[in-house]
Structures are given as C-alpha cells and as structure tokens.
Amino acid sequence: MKARWDAKTTCIYSSLALSHTLLSRGQVAKILANQTRHIPTEYKDVLSYEKALDYIQEVWAASTKPITVLTVRTLAEMVLGQPPEAVERAVNAVEPSIRTLLEYLENQTDHPVIQAGIALCLLSTGAAIPSDSGIVARLTANAFLAKYGYDIRGFLTVEKHWLMNESSYSIALTSLQKQGNLNHWLLFYVSTIEANLQERYEDISNTQVHQDFSAQFWELNERQKGILTHLSDPASSITNRKVQQLFDVSQITASRDLAKLNTLGLIFPHGRGRSITYTRT
C-alpha cells in the first residue's frame, strides 16, 4: 500500500516537473491525500494526472484492445487543461502522424518496452500534439506498458530517473531528429527502465522510505477493513449505498471511508456520480 502510494506520488511529481510545473513532491503528496482545503488552479494538474493514471489502470491494464488515436485524445482531454474542442483541434492537427505511429506499433512484434519507448519518442517529437509539454506522450507510453503488464501494476517510477537526468533525457529524445534513428533514445529508455525496476525492488523491501505522512495516515478503521474483506472476491464490487447498508452508516461516512481507500490505492472507482462502483485494485 505504502509502496504504491509512493510510486504514484513520485510518478506524478516527476512527470509534471519535467513539464516545468513548479510543485514540490510534498505539495503533490498533500494534494493527492486531499489535505489541502483549497486547490489553486495550478494544483489541478496533479489531480488531472492522477485521473489519467486511474484511466490507464482501469482501461488498459492487461487489455487486448489496440491503443488508438482515441486513447491519445482521451488522455489529452484529461491533462491538457483545455476545452474539449481545443484539444480536438490540437489532436486533429497531428492525427495522421499519430495514427500511422500507433498502427505501426500494433502490427509489430517488438518487445512492449520498445513499443512504449517508440511511442514516447515520436509523440514527443514528430507526432507531438502542439499544446503538449510531454505529459500526453509519457502517459501514452505508460498505457503501452500497462497493456502488457510492464508497469508492474503502477509501481514503475521511471519519470524520476528522467527528472534526475533531465539533460540526458532531452538529448536522447531529440536524437532521432539529429541521427535519423532511435538507437540512442531506446538505449537510454531501456536503461532507465532497468534502473528503476531495481530501485523499486529495493524501495518495496525498505519500509522506512515512505515518510510523506504519519503512521496514522495509513491506518484503516474496522469499516474500511470490512469493505476490503467484502471486495476480496475479484468479481465483487461495492457502492456507497451498499456500504451504508452493510455498516449502518450515513452517506457522508460511507463516502469518507471509500475516499480514504481510494486515496490509498486500495480500491478503484468505476463510473461517475451515483452510479459509481468500487473494486479492489
């Protein structure tokens, strides 16, 4: 639980920092934990990015469907902070290039990590959406990794390595235009994936690395534990109304319990409004 929270916080902070969003990791963590009373407009980038990651896990984890232009457009609508019609115009401007890229990847037998790397590079350069600062490109690559299980269920935080080596990241991304091939970029991309996998293994084994909040933040009450027990069957789901009935609590209390479990990454929401249901992650 703590390791997945740490991974999500690090991923969002690092990717936004690569796009020059001036938020500290601590600020990102507090926004994700709903510990800020008022969220300024610039902070909404964090919640939008989280929404996009949730979409990737819900729709693309272990999916057999092809990633298409619609996927890229959906991610762009979530994170670019622009009206839908503006996003549509931006995507349409490069749609032929995006479509050619995605169809090429769909018909190739390259390793999924290589496919993700190719997608990230080309969506950051030749097929880049005009208003994207790299966020949509990185999320699309994440979708490729999730599709084939190489995001290790949300534990991968390779964006951290790119931020730590931002100059090398930028040089590698633009190497295609200068060298006419992807060799430099793919070598950089794969090596950072490999380094991050090793780091995540060490982090998961080290219970002392997660210091964003006090121990109380991670504690679950008996109702919250009961909700997780109810969801122990992979085919089961639960709603706010069902929580009210099972534990004889108000709608507000049920909402708080579900929000806490969702914040900690223990359950996953499906749908919107009153029709929303939750399953185990």
Image: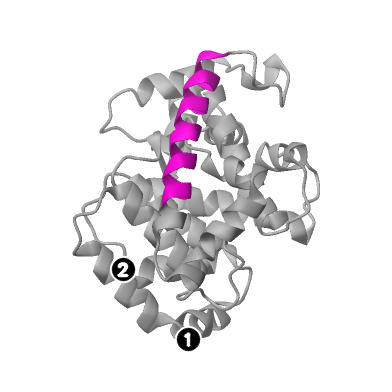
Per the image, label 1 sits on a secondary structure element best described as helix
Residue 193 magenta-drawn? Answer: yes
Per the image, label 2 sits on a secondary structure element best described as helix
Which residue in the structure is indicated by mark 1?
93
Q: Is residue 194 above or below residue 175?
A: above
Which residue in the structure is indicated by mark 2?
102
Q: Nearer the viewer, residue 168 or 12?
A: 168
Q: Position of residue 203 (x, y in %)?
A: 55, 21
Q: Would you say 152 lies left or right of 213 here?
A: left
The crowd level at tag 2 (other Cα within 10 Å; few <14, some 14-19, many 20+) is some
Considering only order in the chain, which callout, 2 or 1, is on the residue closer to the N terminus? 1
Residue 12 magenta-drawn? Answer: no
Q: Disc 1 residue type?
A: Ala
| Magenta stretch secondary structure, dominant | helix
The crowd level at tag 1 (other Cα within 10 Å; few <14, some 14-19, many 20+) is some
Residue shown at the point (45%, 18%) measured from the top left:
226
Residue 5 visible to an observer of this rendering: yes
Q: Nearer the viewer, residue 24 or 54?
A: 24
Q: Position of residue 120 (x, y in %)?
A: 45, 60
Q: Position of residue 144 (x, y in %)?
A: 35, 53
Q: Disc 2 residue type?
A: Leu
- The segment highlighted magenta reads 187-206
Mark 1–mark 2 Cα distance, whole angstroms, equals 16 Å
- Please say which color scheme the image uses: one colour
Residue shown at the point (48%, 56%) measured from the top left:
139
Q: Is residue 252 above or below residue 122?
A: above
